[in-house]
Amino acid sequence: MLDNIQKQLLKEVADLYSMPKGAYNIRANGEKAARNTTENIDIVTKTDNPGIDVYIKDGTQNESVHIPVVISESGIKEVVYNDFYIGENCNVTIVAGCGINNCGSQDSQHDGVHRFFVGKNSKIRYVEKHYGEGTGTGKRILNPVTEVYQKENSYVDMDMVQIKGVDDTYRTTKAELAAGATMIVHERLMTHGQQKATSVYSVELNGDGSSTDVISRSVAKDDSEQIFEVAIVGNTICNGHAECDAIIMDNAHIVAIPRLDAKNVDAALIHEAAIGKIAGDQLIKLMSLGLTEAEAEEQIIGGFLR
């Protein structure tokens, strides 16, 4: 059974107000808390490492898998390995994410290693939210590793969100795309205080007609630090686009490192990067409508990260 703190964390990272419909595996404080499978989606506990294998049958349509993790005890540190085997001609949503409530003096840490093997002509939406809270001095640490292997004409849409409370995070995402495959990534990130966040994306476009679009929107406040690094490798006729837009505030530090590697004359690769402060005229306009400066900043940041 989940306690009230764990239930609140589930609302934050997976928008769950009750047990979801469909397949799910909920992990709490290092242990399996709840699981459900369906006719088309099976979830099996690994025997060699902590974690699960998720098997999605060919032709599965409009189903979902929820695999959130919640930690409400100080001092828990774990590495979990989750593999997803998605059949051909599927259309599914996978909702992950981790929430940590740390009210103690020891660091709490969850490192999730997720691998996706996406079958031909399948469409996957993947949502990963990270959230931290708690009054303790111990850190809330999340280091996700994501690997995506897409077969022909598959489509993966990834929504990566971290808006509040995570002290340290190092996100690594690697993808390999076959012919006609597409991967879209939208990252939304905000740091404050002394928080540090690093995101490293590497996408290899290996098949003719493959494409990717990696977009990051971030806000760094106070003395926080962000590093965004993206590499797109075009090995054939392909299209790749990377974009980093960041708002810097106070004494924050932001680094954007885009890298394009074209190995074919028909590889069309583009990158864009912009880092700047909130425009003064935007603040003045909102303040003229009766908002305080702090309220105006909050409105601008909320719209930017939406």
Image: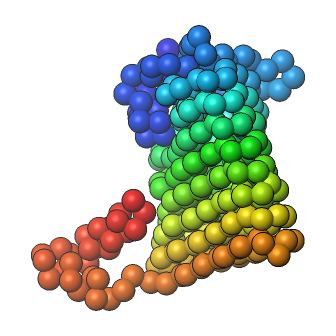
What percent of the width, then of the height, locates residue 126? 57, 41
Q: What colouring style does the render use? A: rainbow
Q: Is residue 65 left or right of residue 259?
A: left
- Residue 210 makes an appearance in the image: yes
Q: Is residue 46 left or right of residue 56?
A: right
Residue shown at the point (71%, 73%) measured from the top left: 268
| The C terminus: image quadrant | bottom left
Residue furthest to the bottom: 280
What percent of the width, then of the height, locates residue 48? 87, 23
What percent of the width, then of the height, locates residue 52? 72, 24
What percent of the width, then of the height, locates residue 294? 28, 73
Residue shown at the point (50%, 63%) measured from the top left: 190
Residue shown at the point (55%, 77%) measured from the top left: 252
Frontmost residue, 144 versus 72: 144
- Residue 73 makes an appearance in the image: no
Residue 49 lies, with reference to residue 100, above or below; the image says above
Q: Across the whole image, how many numbered discs are drawn on residues?
A: 0
Frontmost residue, 174 versus 82: 174
Frontmost residue, 246 versus 7: 246
Residue 277 lies, with reference to residue 9, above or below; the image says below
Residue 162 lies, with reference to residue 190, above or below; the image says above
Residue shown at the point (52%, 61%) measured from the top left: 189
Q: Is residue 300 left or right of residue 256?
A: left
